[in-house]
Amino acid sequence: VNGPALSLLGEREPAIYGAVTLDEIESSCRAWGEEHGVPVCCFQSNAEGALLDFLQAERHRASGAVLNAAAYTHTSIAIPDAIKAVNLPTVEVHLSDITAREEFRKVSYTAPVCIATVAGKGFDSYLAAVEILLAWLAGA
Ligand code: DQA
């Protein structure tokens, strides 16, 4: 589940976020899912409410979520509330290392309700996150 401006990955600040597009990230996650027998469903929106609607709509079908809430990570209370409400194990993911950037990015309102956070590995953050989620589900 990807939040605002991640639709522009590849052209958006490539020095920070890399050259990989969201399409490529989604395809890699789906391919990883096929290899591991785990169907992966991808969604992106620039709108906070649409992210909430998606999590709510998928809450019975999904076993867990990998979420890059993008800038909403640092501002939204509604997103962590939604993660708790839908009760899906969620891994927070970021391409960049949010702990090594501006002060305001060091605050994540989603981290406390997530089972793990992966940041700073670029595109590989997503694959690390799905691995963590699958391992968590296997042990749950
Ligand atoms: C981001 C980091 C956020 O601070 C930023 O607002 C983003 C992307 C990342 O993946 O590194 O939009 O979540």
Image: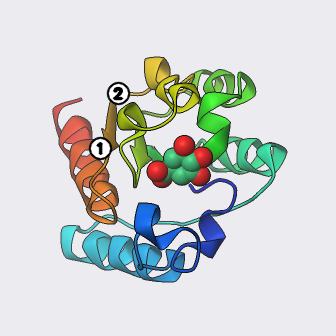
In the picture, residue 2 is in which quadrant? bottom right
Label 1 element class: helix
Image point (33%, 66%), residue name: 123
Label drawn at residue 102: none
Label 2 is placed on what type of residue? Ile
Q: Is mark 2 within 8 Å of ligand 1?
A: no
Question: Is 31 above or below relative to 48?
Answer: below
Q: Position of residue 75 (x, y in %)?
A: 70, 28
Image point (60%, 42%), residue name: 59
In the picture, which quadrant includes the C terminus? top left
Q: Is residue 86 visible?
A: no
Q: Position of residue 102 (x, y in %)?
A: 51, 34
Alpha carbons under labels 2 and 1: distance apart: 8 Å
In the picture, residue 137 is in which quadrant? top left
Question: Is 23 above or below relative to 41?
Answer: below
In the picture, which quadrant includes the N terminus? bottom right
Characterize the local packing of mark 1: few (<14), some (14-19) or many (20 or more) Cα atoms within 10 angstroms.
many
Which residue of the protein is positioned furthest toward the top in this rendering?
112
Q: Earlier in the sequence, mark 2 or mark 1?
A: 2
Q: Is residue 79 left or right of residue 101?
A: right
Question: Is 65 above or below relative to 17?
Answer: above
Image point (34%, 77%), residue name: 28
Label 2 element class: loop
Question: Dots 2 and 1: beta carbons under 8 Å?
Answer: yes
Q: Is residue 98 left or right of residue 49?
A: left
Image point (42%, 79%), residue name: 19
Decide which of 21, 39 is in the foreground and name it: 21
Would you name the residue on which mark 2 appears?
A: 115
Would you name the residue on which mark 1 appears?
A: 133
Q: Is residue 32 visible?
A: yes
Label 1 is placed on what type of residue? Leu
Q: Position of residue 114 (x, y in %)?
A: 43, 27
